[in-house]
Amino acid sequence: MLQKIKQPMPTPEDLINKIQFDYQNGKIWLDEHRMLLIHSSVMGSLRKELITTLGVERARGFLMRFGYQSGIKDAELAHKLRPDMSKAEAFMVGPQLHGLKGMVKAELETLDIDLENGKFYSEFNWHGSFESDIHTADFGITAEPICWMLLGYASGFSSYFVGRKIIFKETQCRGQGHGHCHIVGKFAEDWDDQEELERQLLPDHIVEELFALRYEISTLREKIADYTSPLTDLLINSVGQSDAFKQVCHLIKRASGSNVTVLLQGETGVGKEVVAKGLHLSSERADKAFIAVNCACIPPDLIESELFGVRKGAYTGATESREGKFERADGGTIFLDEVIELSPRAQATLLRVLQEGEMERVGDIKTRKINVRVVAASNENLDEAVKEGRFRADLFYRLNVFPVYIPPLRQRTEDIPLLIEHFLEKYHALYNKKTSGVSDKAMQALANYKWPGNIRELENMIERGIILTDNNNSIDMQSLFPSLIEPSHPMYISTRTGEVSPDDHNEQSAPDNIVEQLLANDLNLDELESQLLKHAMNKTDGNIAQAARLLGITRPQMAYRLKKQQS
């Protein structure tokens, strides 16, 4: 039986509080999603051009799909902001956002949501539809309903929210001369013309043709060796496209055509092993072994035998002769990470390999010829280590024939979106999940972050974000930066503009005059938090969920802080 919603629906204050105008940086935020404020007449111009160029049918489909995706984004926000409300109350985020965005005033007439028993039916009256205004301004009164984008929005929002395909149909429209618009929404299979309605939400075949053309172009490019060499594919497509990193690629490409020893320098986590492997794969040694060794992980008394092998009986425990890493890499490439950790004896043996192309196993007298390209790496300045007497000068000069500096991630922030896409694809497959990517504000925070751990830290963040994020939801800032949800963590906080910075650098977290007042009253942060919690709880009559929304935090965060205050 259909239910007439009689109880008052939740007010939109929790949504309004999520809107931020960051005019200094030219951004508008709705929670963690970047929004745009544009003239409705501009949308009218776009609509007119689509109809003129593509025709009514294709323009309708395009705008409905556009609205559908917008509805999905807002449904994700509804799920996040009102997790503790009833389905009917949380569902009203969509109509309320429709109004807040200036699209239409949605007046609920009927709503029946009973997901356990497979029920969904709703009716709304729309007043002041922006689509009917801009359409009739250009085309006058029409014979068919024309609120296409709004219908797509309602369908996308409801489908995401309910978890099944919901389709809304406009039964009367102000663009047809009616006093207001009226829409009906129900399960797709409950409509007699289901196939036709669903077809409007499917991608246009023009788009499919464009994808097919792009695939053909990609196939042709694969035949051009210089364009899709292993080095280009591994470094450019998987790591970055910034000018700083393209310079690295240029140097490695130069080195790949020779057997020159390469020294990679850069901070921890910048991807030195990836670069070394790219060098190997783009060289004539690609079909031979690539052996990576982290010298810091091998005990100093074993490092020589691990690298160069050992003769049986050379020392206690050497029960059999065995080859070392260099022999395993014969004909190929060996990557020595943290080369500064080599013992003095190992440094001397490595120097001989580089100069003479020969070596002896530990305890052996037999000289073995070896053909290995050496790629060394260090996150320390080897020149300084030589001056301090911690590294052989003659070995440094042999390693430093072809130095390559890999810039830290904070110097190539334009690569961050590309890297994120790469890691999303990797961990979506690993965890069998599919998020909708990183939220706009989280993306800005990632761009502003200083990245002490570089690419390795970014990869770990994305992996954690995917683990903590539900399917089809955006990865938000709290999932990426644990410090934002751990009140005891002193390291980082987020500013209004999405920057993540040390807490003593967050000038925008409160107006200067408020800060001065707090300091004048000798009010510390714990006392301030206590007063804010108390005020929010009093204002919401003790409702933790509503108090959390009032403060712009989640319910678990609110409960954590209340418990902390009581202890």
Image (cartoon, grey):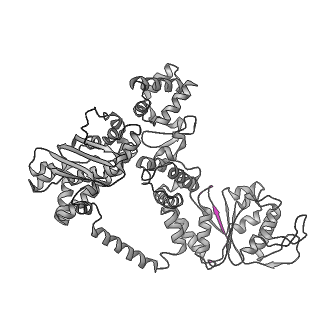
Closer-to-camera residue (236/12): 12
Q: Is residue 426 left or right of residue 109?
A: right
Q: Is residue 103 magenta?
A: no
Is 192 above or below relative to 20? below
Percent x, y of residue 337: 68, 62
Q: Is residue 325 visible?
A: yes
What segment carries the magenta color?
258-270
- Residue 262 belongs to magenta span: yes
Q: Residue at x 34, y 38 (%)?
A: 15
In the image, residue 246 sits, relative to residue 534, either above or below, namely: below
Front residue of 42 and 76: 76
Q: Main secondary structure of the magenta part?
A: loop
Q: Quadrant of residue 390?
A: bottom right
Residue toward you, 279 or 531: 531
Position of 460 relative to 213 (above/below): above
In the rendered view of the protein, which quadrant contains the C terminus?
top right
| Horizontal and vertical percent position of residue 402 | 64, 69
Residue beneath the point at 17% across and 65% down? 55
**Quarter containing the N terminus:** top left
